[in-house]
């Protein structure tokens, strides 16, 4: 049972890339999947002025208990699909997990290694193009990787939710992409929800 006087400290994730790469869909599928698995979830989106070519990002926060505030300035996970989002590395929590797609993120600044050693260079876009013939499913490969590495969500839940969010004609290739991402990596950086900070002080009930 949730402690109504506790301060929540949700796990926070930012997906960032170029508008049109599908990072918003990644966040949407993950958020809905987390709800299915019983978490409290906040999902926010930001679109640039351009349909394609500008920066877009989405944030996912989730916790076992209700979330007190729907925004955060720092993240447990940052997933970069494009160099446009490179500055968000500065928002990564110490010992957080950084994922980046090496097709569009060519260089990670040395300062990242001062924050975390949990840095994963991914070739999702290359795999999507070379193995599945469609670079647009790189986002689903990346979501499969995230599922495997962090163990925050079950692969089958992601597959089920994906099918609720894309046209039926894309179900097969997106499922292949999710399973591919899950299978191509063995690294594990398990994330655990932090225990709440206990009851608030007198006068703040």
Image (cartoon, grey):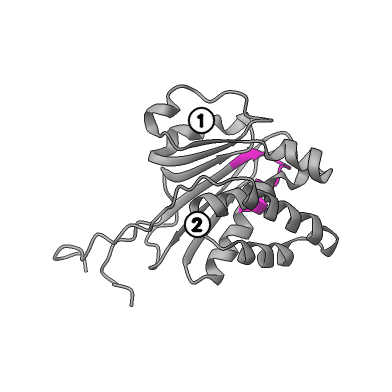
| Mark 2 closeness class: few <14, some 14–19, many ≥20 residues within 10 Å | some
Would you place residue 22 above or below residue 110 in this image? below
- Place of residue 156 in the rendered image (x, y in percent of width and height, measured from the top left): 63, 66
Work out which quarter of the rendered image holds the C terminus and state it: bottom left
At horizontal 20% and vertical 66% (from top left) the residue drawn is 199
Would you place residue 143 above or below residue 200 in this image? above
The outermost residue toward the bottom is 1
Give, as a single range, the part of the protein colored magenta: 16-26
Q: Tell me where residue 5 sits by quadrant.
A: bottom left
Is residue 106 shown in magenta?
no
Give the side of residue 124 with respect to residue 3, left or right. Answer: right
Q: Mark 1 points at which residue?
A: 87
Disc number placed over residue 151 in the picture, else none: 2
Would you place residue 169 above or below residue 17 in this image? below
- Place of residue 108 in the rendered image (x, y in percent of width and height, measured from the top left): 53, 25
Residue 194 at least partly seen: yes
Is residue 21 shown in magenta?
yes
- Place of residue 194 in the rendered image (x, y in percent of width and height, measured from the top left): 33, 57
Q: Is 102 in front, or is 182?
A: 182
Give the side of residue 102 with respect to residue 1, left or right. Answer: right
Would you place residue 180 above or below residue 66 in this image? above
Work out which quarter of the rendered image holds the N terminus and state it: bottom left
Q: Is 102 in front, or is 189?
A: 189
The outermost residue toward the left is 202
- Place of residue 29 in the rendered image (x, y in percent of width and height, measured from the top left): 63, 59
Find the distance from the CA under tag 1 to the CA under tag 2: 26 Å
Q: Tell me where residue 17 sits by quadrant.
A: top right
At horizontal 67% and vertical 36% (from top left) the residue drawn is 123
């Amino acid at each position: 049972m949730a402690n109504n006087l506790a301060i929540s400290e949700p796990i926070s994730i930012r997906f960032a890339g170029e508008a049109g790469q599908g990072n918003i869909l990644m966040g949407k599928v993950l958020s809905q999947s987390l709800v299915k698995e019983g978490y409290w979830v906040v999902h926010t989106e930001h679109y640039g002025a351009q349909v394609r070519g500008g920066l877009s990002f989405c944030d996912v926060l989730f916790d076992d208990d209700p979330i007190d505030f729907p925004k955060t300035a720092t993240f447990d996970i940052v997933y970069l699909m494009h160099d446009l989002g490179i500055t968000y590395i500065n928002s990564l929590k110490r010992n957080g997990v950084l994922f980046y797609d090496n097709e569009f993120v060519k260089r990670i600044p040395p300062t990242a290694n001062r924050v975390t050693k949990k840095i994963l260079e991914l070739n999702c876009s290359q795999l999507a193009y070379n193995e599945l013939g469609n670079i647009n499913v790189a986002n689903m490969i990346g979501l499969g990787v995230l599922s495997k590495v962090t163990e925050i969500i079950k692969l089958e839940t992601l597959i089920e939710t994906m099918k609720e969010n894309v046209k039926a004609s894309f179900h097969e290739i997106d499922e292949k992409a999710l399973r591919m991402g899950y299978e191509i990596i063995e690294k594990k950086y398990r994330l655990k929800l932090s225990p709440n900070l206990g009851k608030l002080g007198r006068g703040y009930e």
